[in-house]
């Protein structure tokens, strides 16, 4: 039986797609071990039942978990985020001996932020002379700058050098788009035949019909625009809030913006809504289990996807794009780059430049003025694009073959 070591600082019960990926590989008959951290994302508090000392080993749905310590990002200050970023890669090195004798065929780093989490994967793969694939989900150091305001040129040059070093140590890289693959071929010094383009898929439950009647009774019959996911500077949710206020001022009386999730930016965003006296039409719902997200998508007249105004962030397509499309609802994308191209090519909504609140407000009004048939068509187009580009089984097979054999589609 083939066996893969997956390295990811974040794993269940934190809400990251790597959990479903690993369980999908197990269902295909592959043994999967995961070297991961102790769950405290996004708020920086230990999840119930966890502490710095325990548990350090678990089995969840057939996946063997080896947990390494980390400094939690409590308070999400610049200092605690930095300490969290650097502590886990260092502490995880002390967990590598626990993997001795397990004889892996390949190592996969599921590389969200920070890029530093690939360090233990690099060390293990080199020591045991097995291929390492780095699945690049957040491009560094650019994603770092969306979280920490680093302007010093020397520090930026160090961050770039460190990021490049990590990308170059991998035998293979996975990118989510052509533009990201082009970028990685330069910073990672890889030929394109060592870089696969595999978008993030979404779990199958996002594509199943959901009942929104309870939410509709709770929130009323309004024009519901819904955002789901993490609240961080990279999402530029202040642009979404500003756009909703502009649209409301311009006469879109039925508008209701529903923000479902949590994260480091929540307190600042709530303060912004309070300052704008927008509490009556902007709701912070809080976090919900992933399997309940389809209910909010079913409620939505439109789903909002946003990113900060950065050409580097525009090289990636947000993971939520796949789940939004699977729900079969129109999308309003405040995004530049690959995400905007996907919405335009799919003809599943309206894409506006990242950071442009006025343009997004106009898109909100435009979607509101669409006929029911046109909104339905946009949703059907979204589902069709999901079916041809983001299906779980297809992308999981591609990832497995590339990680284990280097095969590309």
Image (cartoon, rainbow, N blue to C red):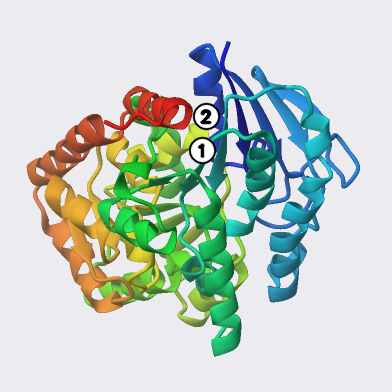
Residue 68 screen position, x and y as percent: 79, 43
CB under 8 Å between discs 2 and 1:
yes
Quadrant for the C terminus in the image: top left
Q: Which residue is mark 2?
A: 20
For disc 1, the neighbor class at 10 Å (few under 14, some 14 to 19, many from 20) is: some
Q: Which residue is mark 1?
A: 17
Residue in the foreground of this view, choosing between 97 and 73: 97
Secondary structure type for disc 2: helix
Write the residue at 21% across / 31% down.
388
Q: Is residue 276 above or below residue 361?
A: below
Q: CA distance from mark 2 to mark 1?
A: 5 Å
Secondary structure type for disc 1: loop
User: Left or right of 384: which side holds 205?
Assistant: right
Residue 199 screen position, x and y as percent: 34, 42
Write the residue at 50% across / 31% down.
291
Quarter of image, res 351: bottom left
Furthest-right residue in this view: 53
């Amino acid at each position: 039986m083939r066996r893969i070591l997956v390295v990811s600082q974040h794993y269940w019960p934190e809400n990251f797609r790597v959990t479903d990926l690993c369980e999908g590989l197990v269902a295909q008959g592959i043994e999967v071990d995961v070297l991961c951290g102790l769950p405290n994302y996004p708020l920086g508090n230990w999840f119930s039942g966890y502490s710095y000392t325990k548990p350090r080993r678990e089995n969840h749905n057939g996946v063997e978990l080896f947990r390494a310590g980390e400094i939690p990002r409590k308070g999400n200050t610049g200092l605690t985020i930095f300490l969290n970023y650097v502590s886990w890669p260092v502490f995880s090195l002390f967990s590598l001996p626990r993997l001795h004798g397990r004889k892996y065929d390949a190592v996969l780093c599921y590389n969200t932020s920070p890029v530093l989490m690939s360090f233990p994967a690099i060390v293990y793969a080199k020591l045991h002379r097995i291929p390492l694939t780095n699945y690049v989900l957040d491009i560094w150091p650019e994603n770092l700058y969306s979280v920490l305001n680093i302007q010093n040129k020397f520090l930026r040059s160090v961050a770039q050098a460190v990021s490049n070093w990590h990308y170059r140590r991998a035998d293979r890289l996975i990118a989510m788009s052509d533009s990201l693959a082009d970028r990685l071929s330069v910073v990672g010094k890889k030929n394109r035949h060592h870089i696969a383009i595999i978008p993030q898929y979404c779990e199958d439950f996002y594509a199943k019909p959901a009942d929104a009647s309870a939410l509709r009774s709770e929130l009323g019959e309004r024009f519901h625009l819904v955002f789901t996911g993490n609240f961080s500077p990279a999402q530029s949710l202040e642009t979404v809030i500003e756009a909703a206020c502009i649209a409301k001022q311009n006469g879109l009386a039925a508008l209701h913006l529903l923000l479902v999730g949590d994260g480091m930016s929540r307190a600042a965003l709530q303060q912004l809504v309070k300052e704008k006296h927008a509490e009556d039409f902007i709701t912070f719902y809080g976090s919900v289990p992933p399997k309940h997200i389809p209910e909010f998508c079913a409620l939505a007249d439109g789903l909002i996807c946003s990113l900060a105004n950065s050409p580097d962030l525009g090289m990636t397509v947000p993971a939520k794009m796949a789940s939004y499309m699977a729900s079969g609802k129109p999308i309003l994308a405040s995004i530049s780059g690959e995400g905007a191209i996907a919405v335009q090519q799919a003809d599943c909504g309206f894409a506006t430049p990242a950071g442009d609140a006025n343009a997004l407000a106009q898109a909100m009004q435009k979607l509101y003025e669409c006929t029911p048939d046109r909104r339905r068509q946009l949703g059907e187009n979204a589902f069709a694009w999901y079916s041809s580009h983001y299906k779980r089984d297809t992308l999981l097979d591609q990832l497995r073959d590339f990680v284990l054999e280097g095969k590309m589609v």
